[in-house]
């Protein structure tokens, strides 16, 4: 769902829950409003666009039942600020109330937004029982309840510790292939105290890429290095109260390479072959449940997706919050995995090209967008833990102290 909540998303959720197509146990994931796929809501294997002019038809298609005129009025109010009444004065008042609603929603954080989802369910149940829009008393009471959820800004003081890193500058117009294309360097300063912004978050990074791209090695290695960073911070007195956990989850239960790497038996190809299983819906649901349970235990969770883009991969990615993609083939990244992450509503925080040692190359940072992404290449991901790789170390630092605190500054 988009964050902050839109009126369409809020009322759409309430209608779907009222009609029994989602319930209070449904996992709700908020996505960045800047994403052009910020309007997605998973519903019984379907994806509903809740912030578009086709909202009414999308809801009809999703719920597959006849919606009565009162629900139509709710949809009309959510989308346009009116309820299709002929009374001009009432229409003006309704639009004014709708403006208050929009203002209230922009001031909610994630926790308050989840409370708003509970409020909308109760409100639509009551509205359906009343079966009238002749008075604005009920809708105004609902908006007042949302306004009461507004989060007041608080000033939090974090340790002022800094991390200084040097990143390369490349020759203009050159394709980055070897280190001799580097003409200089520049210094980047990271605020290590920003990690406290993530202390109460539960963020899943889904690592995607084709089979044999090294994504399993990357997932395990990145989680290990991030955990090492946290351990190092906690050794300082200024970070002694930091409560933070990083984990890795194997989402490719059909081929559990990530688990094999983490447990140290990935070189045993015979055992790995014996562990392979055919994908089924039950297996996919088990993988999704492991993801949700693991993310509840960790502040940052690195998930290793299956190596093929299928409905199962879509299901698993839909429960993540951001994506990392890796491949030896840049075309596969651009034409397959990047569009897949976008269609799943996941911002891509890192694009990585895999290379081999015999190519005479080294791991290297190739592009950085402050607060958004950190791209580069990694050499030799051979199913053994590589947290010592320079690019993986850099990526861990930028995720902890720059990208994730900014991407998820309003919640997770």
Image (cartoon, grey):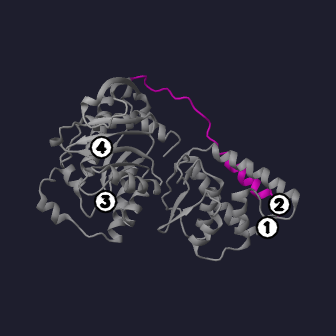
Residue 377 is at least partly visible in this image: yes
Real-space CA distance between mark 2 and mark 4, rounded to the nearest whole angstrom? 55 Å
Frontmost of labels 3 and 4 is 3
Q: Which residue is mark 2?
A: 135
Frontmost of labels 3 and 2 is 3
Q: Secondary structure at mark 3?
A: loop
* Marks 3 and 1, the one that precedes in the sequence: 1
Residue at image coords 32%, 46%: 247
Image coordinates of residue 381 in percent, x first then y, are: 21, 46
Judge the density around disc 2: few (<14), some (14-19), many (≥20) Cα neighbours within 10 Å.
few
Image coordinates of residue 167 in percent, x first then y, are: 33, 28
- Please name whichever residue, 134 or 404, is drawn nearer the observer in this view of the structure: 404
* Marks 2 and 4, the one that precedes in the sequence: 2
Image coordinates of residue 370 in percent, x first then y, are: 44, 33
Real-space CA distance between mark 3 and mark 1, rounded to the nearest whole angstrom? 50 Å
Q: Which residue is mark 3?
A: 306
Q: Is residue 310 left or right of residue 385?
A: right
Q: The N terminus lies in which quarter of the figure? A: bottom right
Real-space CA distance between mark 2 and mark 1, rounded to the nearest whole angstrom? 7 Å
Q: Which residues are magenta?
A: 134-161
Q: Secondary structure at mark 1?
A: loop
Q: Secondary structure at mark 2?
A: loop
Q: Is residue 121 left or right of residue 81?
A: left
Magenta stretch, overall SS: loop
* Marks 3 and 4, the one that precedes in the sequence: 4
Q: Is residue 295 left or right of residue 4?
A: left
Q: Is residue 21 magenta?
A: no
Image coordinates of residue 69 in percent, x first then y, are: 73, 72
Real-space CA distance between mark 3 and mark 2, rounded to the nearest whole angstrom? 53 Å
Q: Which residue is mark 1?
A: 132
């Amino acid at each position: 769902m988009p964050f902050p909540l839109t009126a369409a998303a809020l009322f759409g959720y309430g209608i779907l829950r009222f009609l029994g197509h989602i319930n209070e146990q449904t996992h709700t994931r908020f996505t960045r409003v800047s994403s052009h796929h910020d309007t997605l809501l998973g519903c019984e294997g379907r994806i509903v666009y809740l912030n578009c002019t086709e909202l009414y038809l999308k809801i009809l298609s999703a719920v597959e039942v006849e919606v009565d005129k009162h629900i139509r009025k709710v949809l009309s109010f959510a989308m346009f600020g009116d309820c299709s009444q002929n009374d001009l004065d009432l229409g003006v008042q309704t639009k004014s109330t709708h403006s208050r609603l929009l203002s209230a929603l922009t001031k909610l954080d994630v926790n308050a937004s989840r409370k708003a989802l509970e409020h909308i369910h109760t409100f639509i149940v009551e509205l359906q029982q009343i079966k009238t829009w002749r008075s604005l008393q009920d809708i105004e009471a609902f908006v007042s309840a949302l306004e009461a959820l507004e989060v007041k800004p608080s000033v939090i003081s974090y340790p002022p510790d800094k991390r200084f890193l040097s990143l390369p500058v490349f020759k203009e117009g050159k394709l980055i292939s070897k280190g001799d294309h580097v003409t200089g360097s520049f210094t980047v300063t990271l605020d290590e105290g920003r990690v406290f912004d993530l202390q109460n978050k539960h963020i899943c990074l889904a690592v995607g890429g084709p089979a044999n791209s090294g994504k399993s090695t990357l997932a395990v290695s990145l989680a290990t290095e991030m955990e090492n960073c946290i351990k190092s911070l906690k050794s300082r007195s200024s970070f002694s109260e930091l409560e933070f956990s990083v984990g890795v989850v194997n989402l490719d239960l059909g081929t559990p390479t990530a688990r094999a790497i983490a447990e140290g038996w990935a070189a045993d190809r015979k055992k790995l072959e014996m562990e392979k299983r055919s994908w089924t819906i039950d297996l996919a649901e088990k993988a999704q449940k492991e993801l949700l349970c693991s993310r509840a235990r960790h502040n940052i969770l690195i998930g290793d997706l299956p190596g093929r883009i299928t409905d199962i991969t879509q299901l698993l990615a839909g429960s993540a919050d951001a994506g990392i993609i890796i491949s030896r083939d840049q075309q596969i990244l651009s034409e397959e995995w990047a569009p897949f992450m976008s269609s799943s509503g996941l911002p891509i925080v890192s694009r990585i090209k895999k290379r081999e040692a015999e190519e005479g190359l080294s791991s290297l940072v190739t592009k950085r967008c402050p607060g958004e992404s950190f791209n580069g290449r990694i050499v030799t991901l051979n199913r053994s833990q590589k947290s010592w790789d320079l690019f993986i170390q850099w990526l861990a630092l930028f995720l902890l102290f720059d990208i994730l605190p900014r991407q998820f500054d309003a919640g997770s």
